[in-house]
Image (cartoon, rainbow, N blue to C red):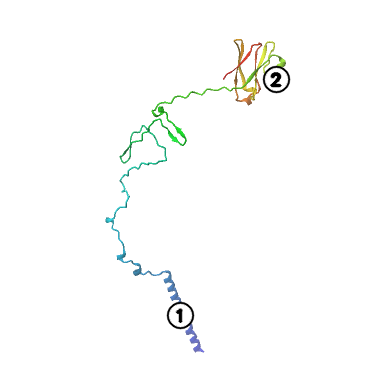
């Protein structure tokens, strides 16, 4: 019995030693696979295969401009920009010292063509002169058809007030009359304003003006004034 136990113990010890050896050998193989040791003899290139460049015998590539030497300015032959005509400039000196003469045009008054539009410069502006002053715009009076209404009786005045709105002066029709201006177009009656009335050369001249501003602030629908009683012909005269 003891002899069998001894054999069994020896077998177990041998088995453990074998397992330890196998584990150590497997770990060593894994390390070699992950971190291979380079072969210096294979990786090192032979000295005779190395190609050396001799800089002393090297030549510059064709078209290479050495640094520090100014290049000649190249004049564009086909440009999309409009030519600039500056008659006061006689000579252009570049950085390299070369002189360039500006192109001379046949006519100094020739303009620059931009598409279908052509803008000309006047000789006065090119020579530093002053442009002629444009005539000042005059105020144009508004032409609006109008007719005078001469109210001679109180009945006519009452009939007028029934269609008009606002406050109108009181008249003594025994020696006075009421002069009113009425529009004969689509314009309202309040656009006409009587400025003055004067008797001259056998006529009664009524000076009036047309004003289309602040119509909403006018309370009266018509312009009316008191005049002396008379039968002189009325003449309307529009003023500014």
Instruction: Quarter of the image for the C terminus: give it.
Output: top right
Residue sitting at x 27%, y 56%: 57
| Residue 60 sits above or below residue 121 on the image | below
Residue 203 image-quadrant placement: top right
Local crowd size for mark 1, using a 10 Å CA cut-off: few (<14), some (14–19), many (≥20): few
Residue at the outermost front position: 106
Q: Position of residue 45 (x, y in %)?
A: 33, 66
| Residue 237 sits above or below residue 130 on the image | above
Local crowd size for mark 2, using a 10 Å CA cut-off: few (<14), some (14–19), many (≥20): few
Residue sitting at x 46%, y 80%: 18
Secondary structure at numbered mark 1: helix
Q: Distance of mark 2 from mark 1, alpha carbons? A: 137 Å
Front position in the image: 188 or 34:
188
Front position in the image: 37 or 147:
147
Q: Which mark is residue 119?
A: none
Judge from the rendering whether residue 126 lies leftward or rightward of residue 141; answer left or right: left
Q: Which residue is mark 2?
A: 161
Front position in the image: 160 or 118:
118
Q: Position of residue 24 (x, y in %)?
A: 44, 75
Residue sitting at x 46%, y 82%: 14
The reply to whether the C-beta atoms of the residues labelled 2 and 1 are less than 8 Å apart is no
Q: Position of residue 93 (x, y in %)?
A: 32, 38
Q: Looking at the image, is mark 2 or mark 1 earlier in the sequence?
A: 1
Residue at the outermost right position: 155
Q: Position of residue 238 (x, y in %)?
A: 59, 18
Q: Nearer the viewer, mark 2 or mark 1?
A: 2
Judge from the rendering whether residue 6 lies leftward or rightward of residue 83; answer left or right: right
Secondary structure at numbered mark 2: helix
Front position in the image: 26 or 176:
176
Q: Which mark is residue 18?
A: 1
| Residue 69 sits above or below residue 30 on the image | above
Residue 204 image-quadrant placement: top right
């Amino acid at each position: 019995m003891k002899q069998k136990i001894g054999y069994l113990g020896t077998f177990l010890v041998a088995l453990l030693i074998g397992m330890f050896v196998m584990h150590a050998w497997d770990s060593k193989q894994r390390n070699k696979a992950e971190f291979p040791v380079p072969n210096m003899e294979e990786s090192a290139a032979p000295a005779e295969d190395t190609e050396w460049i001799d800089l002393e015998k090297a030549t510059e590539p064709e078209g290479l401009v050495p640094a520090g030497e100014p290049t000649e300015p190249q004049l564009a032959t086909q440009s999309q920009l409009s030519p600039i005509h500056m008659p006061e400039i006689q000579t252009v000196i570049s950085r390299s010292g070369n002189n360039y003469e500006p192109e001379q045009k046949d006519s100094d008054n020739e303009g620059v063509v931009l598409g279908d539009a052509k803008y000309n410069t006047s000789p006065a502006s090119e020579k530093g002169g002053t442009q002629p002053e444009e005539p000042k715009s005059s105020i144009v009076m508004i032409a609006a058809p109008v007719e005078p209404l001469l109210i001679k009786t109180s009945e006519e005045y009452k009939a007028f007030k029934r269609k008009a709105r606002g406050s109108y002066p009181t008249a003594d029709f025994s020696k006075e009359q009421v002069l009113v201006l009425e529009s004969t177009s689509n314009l309202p009656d309040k656009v006409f304003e009587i400025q003055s009335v004067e008797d001259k050369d056998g006529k009664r001249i009524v000076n009036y003006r047309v004003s289309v501003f602040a119509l909403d602030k006018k309370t009266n629908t018509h312009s009316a004034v008191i005049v002396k009683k008379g039968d002189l012909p009325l003449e309307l005269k529009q003023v500014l």
